[in-house]
Image (tube, rainbow, N blue to C red):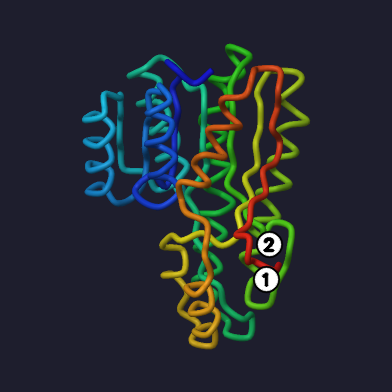
Amino acid sequence: MIKGKVAIVTGASSGIGQATAIALAKAGARVAGGARRTDRLAILKTEIEKAGGEAFVQKLDVTKKADCDAFVDAVVKKWGGVDILVNNAGLMPLSFFKSMKVDEWDRMIDVNVRGVIYCTAAAIPHMIAKKSGHIVNMSSIAGRVVFPSGSVYCATKHAVTAFSEGLRQEFSQRAGIRVTCIEPGVVDTELNNSITDAALAKFVESTKQMEALKAQDIANAIVFAVDSPHYVNVNEIMLRPTTQER
């Protein structure tokens, strides 16, 4: 189901995005990776091509609609369409609301919500035109469970979960576009590096003690959903470390 398809992965320079891009390429997809760190994207492209895959990379800031449009246009020009969109780019600068980290809130909302909407808006007309496609949105356990210090982050991930269901209702039956919402628990990635609230130092340390999920685990879940038969719409995948309580 994946071989020969064109897949776009945002936030592809590291972590889940990088692992997903490589996994999709190994499954036979032509993969376009977008992110802000072009040096990391170049490494990703080389790795995919050395393994015999096809890759395209371009700088992408998902908070800019023009960037999202230009990225998708470049992919369509190169490969003729878009079959799979993985909206992975995201930030998690957790903080207690009383810390009033407004700049962090704004950036998080721009990346986690607007970025998902902008990239989807750029890609979905191409899917509608051929009445097929698959949109994978990266939510989180935080899209279901609210916790202290996560009020704004959880709000962004609740938004992604709701947006995914709205897309499913609008496009799956009418246009053959499948939608999957991925909701991971604690994953060993760079996400915690964006936490600047000193009050969360113990929390960050506690996650390091846990046997967290690996980026590859999430990539495997995405491949499973995308590789399912066309009549199977895997709407949600929630996965936690075995030792994670909430």
Mark 1 neighbour density, 10 Å: few (under 14) some (14–19) many (20 or more): some
Image quadrant holding the C terminus, namely bottom right
At horizontal 78% and vertical 31% (from top left) the residue drawn is 169
Mark 1–mark 2 CB contact (< 8 Å): yes
Residue 240 x/y as whole percent: 63, 57
Q: What type is the residue that disc 1 sits on?
A: Ser
- Looking at the rendered structure, the secondary structure element under dot 1 is helix
Q: Which residue matches tag 1?
A: 151
Q: In this view, does 47 lie to the left or right of 181?
A: left
- Looking at the rendered structure, the secondary structure element under dot 2 is helix
Residue 85 x/y as whole percent: 51, 32
Q: Which residue matches tag 2?
A: 155
At horizontal 30% and vertical 25% (from top left) the residue drawn is 53
The answer to whether residue 1 is above or below residue 56 is above
- Is 106 in front, or is 202? 202
Quarter of the image holding residue 166?
top right
Residue 125 x/y as whole percent: 57, 22
Q: What type is the residue that disc 2 sits on?
A: Ala
- Is 116 in front, or is 83? 83
Image quadrant holding the N terminus, namely top right
The answer to whether residue 86 is above or below residue 28 is below
